[in-house]
Image (spheres, rainbow, N blue to C red):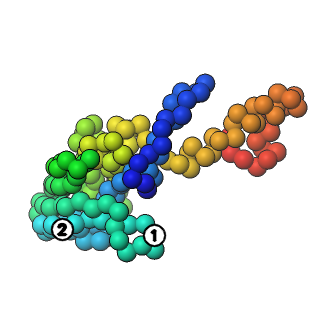
Amino acid sequence: MHDHMGGFGSGWNGAKKVAVEDGLTLSMSALIKKDALAPGRMTHGTWCWSWRGEDEPFAQIGYAADLLDRDNGTLRLDYLVSKEPATSTIRLVTTRPTYGGLRWWLVCPVTGRRAAKLHLPSGGRLFACRQVYGLTYRSCQESGQFRRLFASMGAELGMSPKDVARSHKQKF
């Protein structure tokens, strides 16, 4: 997680996607685990993001949550974007898994889709699902970092890029 993100790459395969890890993420499971969201209650406070091993947060937001209704709720967020105040209200809904109980979800304010996590990348104004911002996971980007090399090696060796990848035990 950084205060800024690098520029977009270019090349034959188009612009590089921004990684989820380079922004702020609201995770439903983390919010519940830390009692920021408590089914059957109203809560409020400050949610912080800190580097591992660091006490000082590098980002924080104010929140007020209403989960009094066991099936629906709201999460109001107050934060700064480029030093400008921003407010967002996120709907919370439940589903009933086949194994029993209730599962809470964040509802993306842009797409209306249920999500376990919402993201705010640098340059974004509101927390939304990763599809809104075209976010990817760094592990997905890294798994493809050798494709061009394997294609080049394969052309020289008369092998397919997948065979070169297999011989180097890399995912293609």
Q: Nearer the viewer, residue 83 or 9?
A: 83
For label 1, the residue is: 52
Q: How crowded is mark 1: few (under 14 residues within 10 Å), some or many (20 or more)?
A: few
The residue that appears at 22% across and 66% down in the rendered structure is 46
Look at the numbered discs 1 and 2 and tell me whether their residues touch, using CB distance below 8 Å: no
Residue 59 appears left or right of 149? left
Q: In which quarter of the image is the N terminus?
A: bottom left
Residue 130 x, y percent position in the rendering: 38, 43
Which image quadrant is residue 55 in?
Answer: bottom left
Q: Which secondary structure lies at badge 1?
A: loop
Amino acid type of the residue tagged 1 in the rendering: Arg
The residue that appears at 18% across and 61% down in the rendered structure is 63
Q: Residue furthest top?
A: 12
Is residue 93 something that shows in the picture? no
Residue 66 appears left or right of 129? left
The residue that appears at 61% across and 46% down in the rendered structure is 142
Question: Looking at the image, is 39 positioned above or below residue 114?
Answer: below
Amino acid type of the residue tagged 2 in the rendering: Gly
